[in-house]
Amino acid sequence: MIPEIALKQQGYQPIMSIRTVTRMEDLPKLIGEKFMRIDRYLKDLGVENSGAPFVAYYNLDMAKLDVEIGFPVEDILPGEGEMCPGELPEGPWVTTLYEGPYEGMKVAYEAMMAWMAVNGWEVAGPYYEMYLNSPDEVKPEKLMTRIEVVVKKAEEESHGMFRND
């Protein structure tokens, strides 16, 4: 089943996150460790996260994945060690809701890329996966992941006398 894809306007959203480089095979364990560490830090501050935990992918190099692991929060908070305050990029994002095992998300990503091509958008920032539930709570086929990507209007090829070759 092809997921529903939409364009949204992302507003101001503070986050607390850890950015790191890892190998794909190490990612599941790393995500769990970093989520727990950030959650513990937020609890120590007496702060609740304000949304689903996320992983942002800044590249797709499976041997050296550049990822940011974090939570949305209500306000900018002080960082500590590898934990840094920040914000989600404001502006247009393409979004879809994927239901199923993490290994099957490729279909949703391909559908998003096709939708962007047809609708005149291109990738302008990281890909985000927001995890709405966890493998500890539900069976793999019931996992819910919001997949989002920062976008910009696609540049049309210029034609005519001002074309830069």
Image (spheres, rainbow, N blue to C red):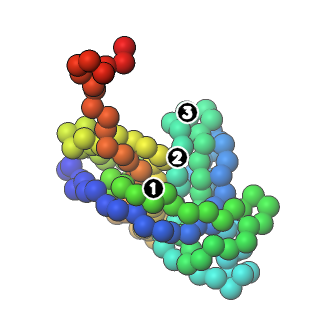
Query: Which corner quadrant holds the C terminus?
Result: top left
| Tag 3 and tag 2, C-beta contact below 8 Å | no
Farthest residue toward the right? 81
Left or right: 64 as drawn, with respect to 7: right
Q: Residues within 10 Å of mark 1 (few under 14, many from 20)?
A: many
Badge 3 is on which residue? 61
Q: Residue furthest bottom?
A: 46
Q: Secondary structure at mark 3?
A: loop
Q: Is residue 35 at all visible to an observer of this figure? A: no
Where, by quadrant of the figure, is residue 35 drawn?
A: bottom right
Distance CA(mark 1)–CA(mark 3): 17 Å
Mark 3–mark 2 distance (CA, rounded to whole Å): 10 Å
Q: Residue at x 55, y 78 (%)?
A: 74
Q: Position of residue 26 (x, y in %)?
A: 63, 44
Q: Are marks 2 and 1 in contact (CB under 8 Å)?
A: yes
Against 66, residue 43 (above or below) is below
Q: Amino acid at mark 1?
A: Glu
Question: Which residue is tagged 1?
Answer: 129
> Does residue 50 sit above or below 35 in this rendering?
below
Percent x, y of residue 11 = 43, 67
Looking at the image, which residue sits at the far top? 165
**Image side of residue 156 versus residue 133, left or right:** left
Residue at the spot x=36%, y=55% of the render? 92
The percent position of residue 77, horizontal first and vertical second, equals 68, 74
Q: Which residue is mark 2?
A: 57
